[in-house]
Image: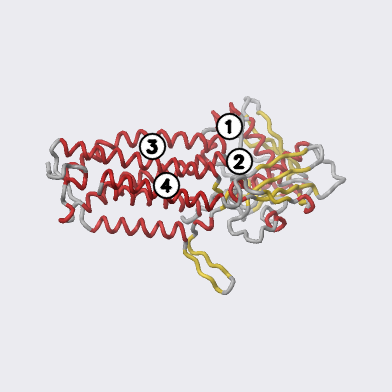
Amino acid sequence: MKSKRTAKPVFFVVFFLILALTFCAFFGIENYYGDTRQVYIKGANDIRWGIDIRGGVEAVFSPDKADAKITENDMDAAKAIIETRLVNNNITDYEVYSDVDNHQIIVRFPWAADESEFDATAAVQELGETALLTFCRNEDSKDVILSGSKDIERAEPGVDENGAYVVYLYFTDEGTDKFAKATKELVGQKISIWMDETEISAPTVNEAITNGTAYINGMESSEAAKDLADKINAGSLPFALTVDDSKLQIISPTLGSDALSVMLIAGSIAFGIICLLMILRYRLNGFVASIALLGQLAGSIACISGFFPNAESFTLTIPGIAGIILSIGVGVDCNVIASERIRDEFEKGKTIDGAIDSGFKNSLSAIIDGNVTIVIVSLVLMGAFGTPDSIIAKIFSPIMSLLGSSITGSIYSFGYTLLIGVIFNLIMGVLASKYMLKSISQLKFLRKPWLYGGKKNG
């Protein structure tokens, strides 16, 4: 059976697309109008580096009313709102501690990507003060039914008569009237709950609610119910959170200020050596594999920097860099397996086209098995150490609820970069490599079996 050939221009099209992606992912596209920077495509300079790499800020938040009666639940709610603000700003490398006795919340977070003045006061303004909580019709954040402490007195986690986890809501007199009127009109429809511009829940109205209390069901665990209650209470706090400027501190990076430059240089040298070794060992197969690895790396950087539409930049920590490195290793392994299978096919007497087709086909199962295993590990890490509101965390919530919640941005960063690296490995290392190699093998001066792993006189 004759193998289907790939057109010669395919190699050059894919090659230049990868080069374009690499350039844009690393350098971005921007323009300056005087002192104003206009960013069209975000590059590596827009990556927010973690505290361990670039340092950050430590701030102490306190209630603005010293004489207010503040409970432990109030402090938990205030802590939840700070975490929500951090996540909304796509800051995943952070630490938030609650000092209940002194009514203080200590927050540590990294500098913004474009920070040049290293002004701690300006950095804290990114988090703002108390967020606005609203209840809206359906999922339209602009059609507000209830808002803040004037309508919502408090929320409490609990269980219903069937033992299911729920969040009980208690409204003020004004909120009771508003909610009764709205629920009469929205039976069978949704009322969405928003914290600033983020939807945190969207329960369905089963019946009109006129007694000033309600509950939200569908909670996976007691932790999920408490988390939602804290966020609702955070939007209805009787006080605003302010920052004590005298306690602002600048956090030095764990590895020192030159660590990032050293890592980039070392990584570039290591990448170059790997590509050279693959070319020496596998000749043209290694050359194509090096291009695919470059595409994989560029794709990973693009996902971190906010290159793609509707994808914000991601906080990159040292474990996150380790995830990129590990995924590159997986990419090398993928290409090595394919090249070795192609070499085996030549030993069976196959032609160039037949060897390439059979080699990739025979290597696919091993490549898929290894990559799927890593994808599962990555998803588990992101579910275990990410924010409770993330889709992945909700998928794994039945398992994670048994272990307790733990938000650790550096580990989440590792899982994220490992996941996107493996996804781009499947795109570049399997699809792009195959079609580039099949295409370039059609060039007459390259139709020599030894260039693909066959014998020199074959």
**Mark 3 belongs to which amino acid?**
Asn
What's the CA distance linking mark 4 and mark 3?
A: 22 Å
Question: Image check: 75 left or right of 7?
Answer: right
Mark 3 secondary-structure assignment: helix
Q: CA distance from mark 2 to mark 1?
A: 19 Å
Image-quadrant location for residue 348: top left
The quarter of the picture where residue 8 lies is bottom left
Q: Could you tell me which quadrant the N terminus lies in?
A: top left
Residue at the image position 28 percent from the left and 40 percent from the top: 338
Q: Earlier in the sequence, mark 4 or mark 1?
A: 1
Residues at marks 1 and 3, CA–CA distance in whole angstroms: 30 Å
Up the image or down, 119 lies above or below 163; here it is: below
According to the image, label 2 marks what residue? 205
How far apart marks 2 and 4 lie (CA) works out to 58 Å
Cα gap from disc 4 to disc 1, whole angstroms: 45 Å
| Depth order, front residue of 76/122 | 122
Mark 1 touching mark 3, by CB under 8 A? no
- Camera-near label (2 vs 1) is 1
Residue 147 left/right relative to 200: right
Amino acid type at mark 1: Glu
Residue 5, given in percent of the width and then of the height, sits at 18, 50
Which label's residue is closer to the chain start, 2 or 4?
Answer: 2
Task: Name the residue tied to disc 3.
Answer: 371
Q: Which residue is mark 1?
A: 220
**The C terminus lies in which quarter of the figure?**
top left
